[in-house]
Image (tube, rainbow, N blue to C red):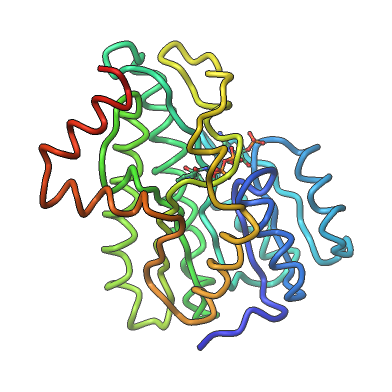
């Protein structure tokens, strides 16, 4: 069992959705929290709403498509003296056909969703090893099964799964927990903010986000998984049957997705 009380926790994507809920949940554990996303004002608002005192949080805006991870880690260590928990949560979604998606947009999604997680995790590792801490990565059900209009998003999340599942074996001997988080449908605005093939915002919500699990419930599940030293959690409902159906009855899965997307 692990303890979250008074830990130093770094959350990426802390300005909205699941990351914001994690800030509020970890603030209740008296954690010192580093809030990262690319929008400083939104992060300041979240930090204020969390009730944390200014000495117990650090707003650290980063454009995760292109950032200096070592310099960011130095800022955190200068303020708090170490790192106990890193939650790689920031992500961006895609809503367009693969054929219509520009290479620059595909690279942007891979940078934010995959390479930023790898880069930040590696820069934090000396401190996570020293604290025998935890690193978590938010994957997706689309990191287990593909779906139309999500070619690069799915590819980025498959990469996250492969990387963090493998890293777990390498870090066990240092006492570092590696937690892979697989959300199904969550109630957030991620689809509205999705990138289309030319880089513009999709601008519409999806039914799966409207009916999805609340981010507060998901944040609770993640904290419980951190406490219980788990390496893998799924969050959501029956949508988690998709990978099982896809593995044993790939034809049925393909047919359902084709019908759902009217292809
Ligand atoms: N919602 C779902 O149904 C669902 C399902 C499976 C997996 N997930 C995963 O869950 C995680 C959290 O997503 P969410 O649903 O909570 O969506 P969200 O509300 O859109 O949160 C995404 C966060 O990532 C930040 N972010 C995006 N691009 C960034 C960049 N270039 N640099 C720095 N920060 C950036 C956003 O900041 P700004 O908004 O300030 O730009 C925001 O704080 C993501 O990894 C997502 O892929 C979500």
Q: Residue at x 41, y 76 (%)?
A: 230
Q: Quadrant of residue 217?
A: bottom right
> Residue 27's spot in the image, x, y percent?
76, 67
User: Looking at the image, is 36 positioned above or below residue 200?
Assistant: below
Query: Quick one: which residue is furthest to the bottom in this view?
Result: 1
Q: Quadrant of ligand 1?
A: top right
Q: Residue at x 55, y 52 (%)?
A: 213
Q: Residue at x 32, y 17 (%)?
A: 97
Q: Where, quadrant-wise, is the C terminus in this rendering?
A: top left
Task: Please count the marks in the image.
Answer: 0
Left or right, 54 with reference to 210 = right
> Residue 148's spot in the image, x, y percent?
30, 26
Q: Foreground: 89 or 170?
A: 89
> Residue 38's spot in the image, x, y percent?
65, 36
User: Looking at the image, is 33 positioned above or below residue 133?
Assistant: above
Q: Quadrant of residue 79?
A: bottom right
Q: Residue at x 49, y 53 (%)?
A: 120
Left or right, 171 with reference to 59 = left
Q: Foreground: 239 or 124?
A: 239
Left or right, 23 with reference to 209 = right
């Amino acid at each position: 069992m692990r303890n979250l009380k008074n830990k130093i926790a770094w959350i990426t994507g802390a300005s909205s959705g699941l990351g914001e809920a994690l800030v509020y949940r970890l603030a209740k554990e008296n954690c010192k929290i580093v809030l990262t996303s690319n929008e400083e004002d939104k992060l300041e608002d979240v930090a204020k709403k969390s009730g944390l005192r200014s000495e117990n949080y650090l707003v650290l805006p980063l454009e995760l498509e292109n950032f200096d991870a070592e310099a960011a880690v130095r800022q955190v260590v200068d303020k708090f003296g170490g790192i106990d928990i890193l939650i790689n949560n920031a992500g961006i979604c895609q809503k367009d056909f693969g054929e219509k998606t520009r290479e620059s947009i595909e690279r942007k999604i891979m940078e934010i969703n995959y390479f930023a997680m790898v880069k930040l995790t590696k820069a934090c590792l000396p401190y996570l090893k020293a604290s025998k801490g935890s690193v978590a990565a938010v994957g997706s059900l689309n990191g287990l099964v593909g779906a139309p209009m999500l070619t690069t998003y799915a590819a980025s999340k498959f990469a996250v799964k492969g990387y963090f599942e493998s890293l777990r074996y390498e870090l066990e001997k240092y006492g570092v927990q590696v937690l892979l988080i697989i959300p199904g449908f969550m109630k957030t605005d991620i689809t509205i903010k999705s990138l289309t093939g030319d880089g513009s915002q999709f601008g519409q919500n999806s039914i799966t986000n409207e009916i999805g699990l609340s981010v507060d419930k998901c944040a609770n599940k993640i904290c419980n998984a951190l406490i219980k030293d788990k390496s893998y959690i799924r969050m959501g409902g029956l949508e988690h049957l998709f990978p099982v159906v896809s593995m044993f009855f790939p034809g049925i899965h393909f047919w359902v997705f084709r019908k759902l997307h009217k292809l």
